[in-house]
Image (spheres, rainbow, N blue to C red):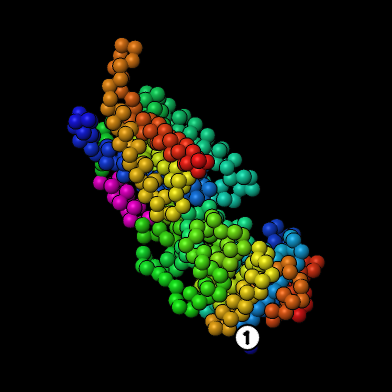
Amino acid sequence: MEPISRAIELNVGYRKNFPILENCNLEIYLGEMIALLGPNGSGKSTLIRTWCGLQKQLSGKIVSIPEVSFSLVPQVKNINFGFPMSVKDTLLLPRKAKTFFKKVKFTLKEEELLEKSGITNILYNQISQCSGGQLQKVLIVRSLFSYAKIIFLDEPMDALDPTTTQTMLEVLKSFKKENQMSFFLITHNASQEFLDNFDRVFEIQLKQIVQKK
Amino acid sequence: MKEFFSNLILFLPQFFLGSILGMFLSVLGIILILRKMAFFGVTLSQVANFSFALSLFLGFREESFPLIFSVLILVPVFYFTRTTKSKSDTVLGIIFVSFGSLAQVLLSFGGNVQNHLLSAYFGDILTSEIKIKSFMLLVLGVNIILFIFLYQKIIFFSFDPDEYKVRNYPKYVEILFLAIVTSMLSISVNLLGSFYSAAQLIIPGFTALYLFRKLFLVILFSILLSFFATLIGFYISFQEIHYKNETIFLPTSSSIVVCLATLCLIFVSFRKWYTHK
């Protein structure tokens, strides 16, 4: 099977001669779940930001098939939650931005997913009133509703309790199965129980990406 | 009151333009505040001020020149604030004082500096010969339509710029939004002064965001506050004030700004009192 996106000899970082991650060779196949572990400052977020096109690579390249689309679940701290918007507005905003004041709504399947994720009961709450965990779930679901082929998730489960983490992993898995998409998730959770949910697991060690599973 | 309305009819074009500009600036200001770019907006008003002075200095009397200069200067200013390693508010502070002073230097070449300066900073909506020229109306109209058309994209971009870019939404939206802000500020500074423009950009939006949690209500309240402050400001400036055996009239633009600030203080205090009750 051909990968839908691949990093070739990728060097990422902020200063030209000082890459924080070197010679990264990694492929993403359709329908797989990948986890990336690594200590703070090892370049995990920089790698996915580069892969998404938010910053330039120092060298190397990223090759994707033309039909590929990306979405990014950022860390909660990177989002401006002072915005006067409800959870529903937040989830529908990307869709509204594509139309011109046309009414947009969730499909039945999406409503089911909202229910499963425990978002239905906070749908009309203001995002400024949501807890960190609730916001994290909202951001994950917003990305799922993009139906992007590859969704990058930057420490998405960090603010979630173990039960909610497992629920959200189940949501990701069922959504992936139904919609043929791939997930690339950054995490600090190295427990076997958590990592068992992924098809492949990588770790950053000494500026290199090493496959663990 | 009857006298006020007959005066208002006399100055209807000024009132019409002042309130429309104010209301539109207040809506643009909400987005700048939400993006933590309020100081950027205030700095842009100084850039517009400088463009106004530069046009006078070069002898370009057409209204289009300050507007074109402002938009042209916006691009390097924006690029510079985004790419500098220093904190952007520091850089904006430098740009603010530099362009403000440059405007003063250029205006001094024209003679009658004090009048020009007063006009540039505080506006002279009633005393100057204001003609609502078709060019200004065209720019105002185009900007309002463009803003409505791009509204959802601007909100998405402002809320989560990274995801906006990752999903491949049009990249021009940010620069177009800033061009709208700059051109509106340029027209507003030209007619009503930089203080009026900066005040309309920040005060109604700040007050509305303090009071409401729904974007629709924030925008609506901001528009209403801007309109009523303009109306009250006009009313105050039409009143004869007897002070030290002289009859004086308060300046209109400054009266509007003081009204805005006072209303802001009243609403914010009321909200604080209400939430503590």
Q: Is residue B197 visible?
A: yes
Please give left or right for residue A86 compared with residue B122 in the image.
right
Chief SS of the magenta region = helix
**Vertical side of A171 occupied by B252: above or below:** above
**Vertical side of A7 occupied by B133: above or below:** above
The magenta-colored residue range is: B134-147
Q: Position of residue B157 (x, y in %)?
A: 49, 59
Q: Chain of mark 1?
A: A
Q: Position of residue A189 (x, y in %)?
A: 73, 69
Q: Quadrant of residue A59?
A: bottom right
- Name the residue furthest bottom: A1
**Vertical side of B5 occupied by B140: above or below:** below
- Name the residue furthest top: B245
The foreground one among B27 and B95 is B27
Q: Quadrant of residue A12?
A: bottom right
Q: SS class of the residue under badge 1?
A: loop
| Residue holding disc 1 | A2
Residue found 40% across the figure and 69% down from its top: A104
The foreground one among B101 and A150 is A150
Look at the image and say whether residue B204 sits in the magenta stretch.
no
Q: Amino acid at mark 1?
A: Glu
